Amino acid sequence: MAYYKQIATAGGTLVCAVGIGFIMQNSDTAESRYGAAKAVQAPVAVQAPVDTAALDGPVLDVHDIILTSALDQDAPDAGRRDTVVALGPVDTLVSPDTSDVAPGQSCSVTAVAKPSGLGLVDLTVIAPCFANERLTVHHSGMRFTETTDATGALDLSMPVLADPAVIVVAFANGDGAVAQTDVPSLNQFDRAVLQWKGDAGFQIHAREFGADYGTQGDIWAESPGDPVQAISGEGGFLMRLGDQTASDAMVADIYTYPSGASRQAGVVDLSAEIEVSLFNCGLDIEAQSLEVRDGDITTRNLDLTMPGCDTIGSFLVLNNLIQDLKVAQK
């Protein structure tokens, strides 16, 4: 998924919200953190908001968002917005295409999961009647969209949140399979997940032990860290799951830190951030966080109305959707 940024020259903007704290950074700050602007492309059809009808957990409702100028932060209630929750459409059920299946070949779907270290699992899906078809992977509240290859197969590596790990794969017509495996290494790692649907523009930033944005130790999708460092306890890493070329794909950022073998003590500053873009400005968007700490999973939901399209290129920083990680040296 491409992010289209337009770096503006206007003054800073501050966003204040009740229930969850976040800051809207102006485009000058965004440029210093994320780099120079990319060309803005012509707008395309925007996606429906995230469907969280089946998600559990407390909802962090954002009310009465006030946009104020950085030069006049005492202005009365200008630009007030209220959050409106809207759910996306349910996928249309379709039948599998069996025209290319050899006579006598089974159309059954199989899934196999094997642990691979670092609290990761290698997942293999075989679905000969579902070539080049999208599917949804479910695990302990985490969901993301993937697409099979021309033979109906899918192979991927994924962080898991529970041991044993139960993984469900489901196609649009309801066919699917279940895989299960033990993950003995999981208890050495803490995890934070941020998941959303479509081009909402979310991302996790994990700034390890005082690291500033754009420096070594700022772990995010464009600087995901090295799993090898997690093996030695020197740092965390991030994986983004989900086929972002698929329409309205469900996507997940998963940050992992080796708390059970950390060579440092301190705090990993975790935040969920959203770029205001042509694809989300003025829309109602939804996201969900899941955190694994000491084997327990905590879930939080976010419902948010994005600022208007005159703020494209700015970033919302949500500081409370994901809690900071306090690490002890081992």
Image (cartoon, helix red, strand yellow):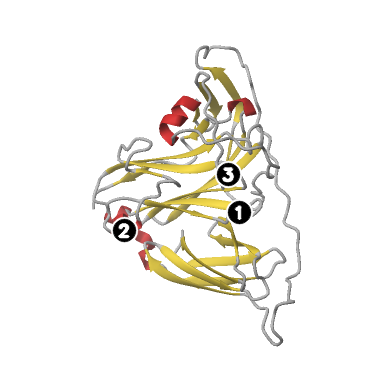
Image x and y of residue 131, in percent: 65, 70
- Residue at 58% across, 62% down: 137
- Res. 153 in view: yes
Q: Please name which of the two marks, 1 or 3, marks the residue nearer to the observer.
A: 1
The Cα–Cα distance between marks 3 and 2, rounded to whole angstroms, is: 30 Å
The secondary structure type at the circle numbered 1 is: loop
The residues bearing labels 1 and 3 have C-alpha atoms spaced at a distance of 19 Å
Residue where numbered disc 1 is placed: 245
Q: Residue 147: give x, y in percent of width and height.
A: 60, 63
**In front of the other: label 1 or label 2?**
1
When asked about the image quadrant of residue 216, the answer is top left
Query: Residue 72: x and y, percent?
Result: 52, 12
Q: Which residue is mark 2?
A: 228
Would residue 30 be found to the left or right of residue 283 on screen? left
Relative to residue 132, is residue 296 drawn left or right? left
User: x%, y% of residue 312?
Assistant: 58, 30
Residue type at tag 1: Thr
Mark 1 or 3 closer to N-term? Answer: 1
Q: Residues within 10 Å of mark 3 (few under 14, many from 20)?
A: many
Residue 287, which numbered label? 3
Residue occupying the point 62% across, 16% down: 78
